[in-house]
Amino acid sequence: MISIWRIAAGRGQTTVRIGVLALQGDFSEHLAMVAELGWHGVPVKEAADLVGLDGLVLPGGESTTQCLLLEASGLRCPITEELRDGLPALGTCAGLIMLSRTVIGGREDQWSFGVLDVAVRRNGFGRQVRSFEANLVVEGLVDVMRAVFIRAPVITEVGDKVEVLASVPYRFPDGTQVQVPVVVAEGSLVASSFHPELAGDPRLHELAFGRSVGRSIADIVSTLDEREERYVGSFQMGDDQTQEGRSG
């Protein structure tokens, strides 16, 4: 496990502060993951909550609703500035959409922060009935990660500087089967098409914010190797989590 002092050492801090956008979606589950790693989670609801953060989680939920709430709360511009200045961020499902440079299949007035060089299609894996789980091999993690896909976005294009950390074989309704990127990273940004928080697995958060002091994935693999507990998720589709409010 990456300890607090190992991440904070480069900043002269004694506590790691990870913000979680808390306007809509799975923010409470992400705050639980942050707490499990021994970090201080900060619900972000207004611009003042961004002060002093070491990283920011953009959670799953409904991306068009989040766009509206970010505008109404006055958070759109401050978060944009923080991300462009290099604030480490993890975006999951709708959070991936919010980070991406191009959104396909959204409303005409839908926007994104445009800081991650990928194109994504909203609900690209299909509607609610096509929700699924998969065991993923994620670069930088020892054991497989159980991934929960609920109305998940599909990454259709990645830029030259984007690392693909995990892919999944998927058969689309038209019969096409391809390997689809589902975890990507670029600079201080990590994003996934799925919901790691719903399987109770904090390792993607650990991987994302372990990069926050400039260490590469290779640099932190040995630290992740030391984790005694393995998170092969037991989350079952059909639980209350699979409600229509969870979407890209």
Image (cartoon, rainbow, N blue to C red):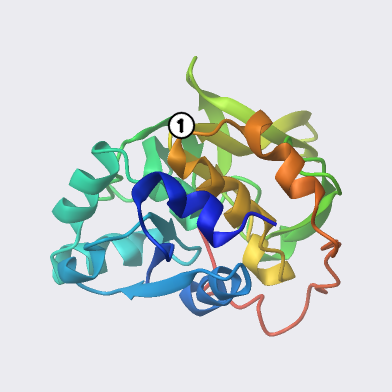
Residue at 77 percent across and 28 percent down: it is: 178
In the picture, measured across the screen, residue 116 lies left or right of residue 107, that is right
Closer to the camera, 29 or 155? 29
Residue on which the image places disc 1: 119
Q: Is residue 202 visible?
A: yes
Dot 1: few (<14), some (14–19), or many (≥20) neighbours within 10 Å? Answer: many
Total of numbered circles in the picture?
Answer: 1
Image: 227 above or below 242? above
Q: Is residue 11 above or below residue 148?
A: above
Please state which of residues 124 and 74 is positioned toward the viewer in this rendering: 74
Q: In the image, what residue occupies the spot 67% across and 70% down?
A: 198
Residue 25 appears in the picture as rendered? no
- In front: 206, or 160? 206
Establish if 170 lies above or below 44. above
Q: Position of residue 123 (x, y in %)?
A: 55, 51
Q: Residue at x 57, y 71 (%)?
A: 38
Residue type at numbered disc 1: Ala
Q: From the image, which quarter does the N terminus lie in?
A: bottom right
Q: Where in the figure is residue 41, as x and y percent of width and height?
A: 44, 73
In-image side of 197 versus 100 (left or right): right
Question: In the orientation shown, which residue stands out farthest toward the bottom?
Answer: 240
Residue at position x 83%, y 44% in the image: 142
User: Where in the figure is residue 35, as x and y percent of width and height?
Assistant: 56, 75
Judged from the image, the secondary structure of the residue bearing numbered disc 1 is strand
Q: Position of residue 34 (x, y in %)?
A: 54, 69
Residue extending farthest to the top is 160
Does 18 sit above or below residue 110?
A: below
